[in-house]
């Protein structure tokens, strides 16, 4: 009984001692974010503690699809003390642009002089301007945000979006497991002012990783506006199906599916495509795998042509094959490997089959490969030896050519030794050195003899 009592007293004493010497939690107040949309987000906080604060780290980020937990860290400058003021600015032009409506989060990690760490609560906010009176309506998994338009307009666009989601689910099996936010600006100028680094012809943009779509409206062509809603929502659905850290979806496939989900081309786009077929000015499918041109007419043809290619694949081989192609890309296959695995064609084979189906001229194949220089090691400079840098020649290497074609450049013959002029110069230089050495030696001999003669006279 006495032993138990002593043990209890000792434990309580140790607990009291440890509590007395433990550093209290730091207190984070005035914890705020100041948004200068779309340029910067400034985080501020006042942090106080009974002991000196030695370290303050801002942890922040935005909610999006990722392959793992992503936590960005910033280290604001401050003066150590019991009360510190921390501030750090997130520069969007330096780090990369976030879409309007993105959900930002942040927290402060504070360490005092005793090593005691405090982590503040995680706070969130929406990356969006505060100069417009945004309103929102919802239907199923779609949330529509708008301003400077009436509710009837917003309801109509919401219904179009909901129908587009249902159509994609029924026709292509594309679905979303989380809400999609659609931000509709009353004109294209407002939308472009809310973004950074977008092409001048952009009317809408989908951000699949954040489940966000932004777009402007024309105010004059309601069919165009409705098609854009479905177009951009399709990008989000494709992005969800193909999300992976291993592969990527080529632009022609992504945009072609989006235009296909709209129901087809308008009269102008169809005519532009037919003109390109007749004049044999179609773009290669491989060139459409990356981003489209900044030139509006060329970008428009890129969309129309991408639609035509996707339409050919779906109507020739079926929707199941298209889904299999998307899954193959998600699994990390290259575009050529995914096409070969699904259709038995690489990109050039697909282009040949597609051109034949639409009545276009066969793909142009260059008779000779294009010359491309191979990397050459920079030679080490050795005095009076080796070939000069001007004699190093580049060997042409055969690579596939584009439809424009080309011929390899003719290279001059490679010299196998130093040129004659350099040899003569080096030989003359050596002779001069030998002559100088000889003169110096002769002078030393004469001087030595003169000194001997002088001593004899004394």
Image (cartoon, rainbow, N blue to C red):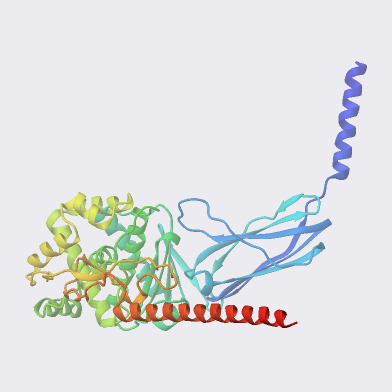
Q: Where is residue 435 in the image (x, y as percent from the top left)?
A: 47, 81
Q: Is residue 296 left or right of residue 97?
A: left
Residue located at (19% from left, 61% from top)? 347
Q: In this view, does 147 lie to the left or right of 274?
A: right
The furthest residue to the front: 457
Which quarter shows the C terminus?
bottom right
Which quarter shows the N terminus?
top right
Q: Nearer the viewer, residue 281 or 417?
A: 417
Q: Position of residue 420 (x, y in %)?
A: 29, 79
Q: Is residue 264 visible?
A: no
Q: Determine which quarter of the picture holds residue 280.
A: bottom left
Q: Where is residue 423 in the image (x, y as percent from the top left)?
A: 34, 77
Answer above or below: position of 272 versus 95: below
Q: Nearer the viewer, residue 248 or 393?
A: 393
Q: Is residue 206 left or right of residue 8?
A: left
Answer above or below: position of 324 versus 296: above
Residue located at (43% from left, 67% from top)? 380
Residue located at (11% from left, 67% from top)? 355
Q: Which of 170 and 450 is in front in this view?
A: 450
Q: Can residue 399 be seen in this view?
A: yes
Residue located at (70% from left, 79% from top)? 456
Q: Determine which quarter of the picture holds residue 431.
A: bottom left
Total marks placed? 0
Q: Nearer the viewer, residue 91 or 413?
A: 413
Q: Where is residue 178 in the image (x, y as percent from the top left)?
A: 43, 54
């Amino acid at each position: 009984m006495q032993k138990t009592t002593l043990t209890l007293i000792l434990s309580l004493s140790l607990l009291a001692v440890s509590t007395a010497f433990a550093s209290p939690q730091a207190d984070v107040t005035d914890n705020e974010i100041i948004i200068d949309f779309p340029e910067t987000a400034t985080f501020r906080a006042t942090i106080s503690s009974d002991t000196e604060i030695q370290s303050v780290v801002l942890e922040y980020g935005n909610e999006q699809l990722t392959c793992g937990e992503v936590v960005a860290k910033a280290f604001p400058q401050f003066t150590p003390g019991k009360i510190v003021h921390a501030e750090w600015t997130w520069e969007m032009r330096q780090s990369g642009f976030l879409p309007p409506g993105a959900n930002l989060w942040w927290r402060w990690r504070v360490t005092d002089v005793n090593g005691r760490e405090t982590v503040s609560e995680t706070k969130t906010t929406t990356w969006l301007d505060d100069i417009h009176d945004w309103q929102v309506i919802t239907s199923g998994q779609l949330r529509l945000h708008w301003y400077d338009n009436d509710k009837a307009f917003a309801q109509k666009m919401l219904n179009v979006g909901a129908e587009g989601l249902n159509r994609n689910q029924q026709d292509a099996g594309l679905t979303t497991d989380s809400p999609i936010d659609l931000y509709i600006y009353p004109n294209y100028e407002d939308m472009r002012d809310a973004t950074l680094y977008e092409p001048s012809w952009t009317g809408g943009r989908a951000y699949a990783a954040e489940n966000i779509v932004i777009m402007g409206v024309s105010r004059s062509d309601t069919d165009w506006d409705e098609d854009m809603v479905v177009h951009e929502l399709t990008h989000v659905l494709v992005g969800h199906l193909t999300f992976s850290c291993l592969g990527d979806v080529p632009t022609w496939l992504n945009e072609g599916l989006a235009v296909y989900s709209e129901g087809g081309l308008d009269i102008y786009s169809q005519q532009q495509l037919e003109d390109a077929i007749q004049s044999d000015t179609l773009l290669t499918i491989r060139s459409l795998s990356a981003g489209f041109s900044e030139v509006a007419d060329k970008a428009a043809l890129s969309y129309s042509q991408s639609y035509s290619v996707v339409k050919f694949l779906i109507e020739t081989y079926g929707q199941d094959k298209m889904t299999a192609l998307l899954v193959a890309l998600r699994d990390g296959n290259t575009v050529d490997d995914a096409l070969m695995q699904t259709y038995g064609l690489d990109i050039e084979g697909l282009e040949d089959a597609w051109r034949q189906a639409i009545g276009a001229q066969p793909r142009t194949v260059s008779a000779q490969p294009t010359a491309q220089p191979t990397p050459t090691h920079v030679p080490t400079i050795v005095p009076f030896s080796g070939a000069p840098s001007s004699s190093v020649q580049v060997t042409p290497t055969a690579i596939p050519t584009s439809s424009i074609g080309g011929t390899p450049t003719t290279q001059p013959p490679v010299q196998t030794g130093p040129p004659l002029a350099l040899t003569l110069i080096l030989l003359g230089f050596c002779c001069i050195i030998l002559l100088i050495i000889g003169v110096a030696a002769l002078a030393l001999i004469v001087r030595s003899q003169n000194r001997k003669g002088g001593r004899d006279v004394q």
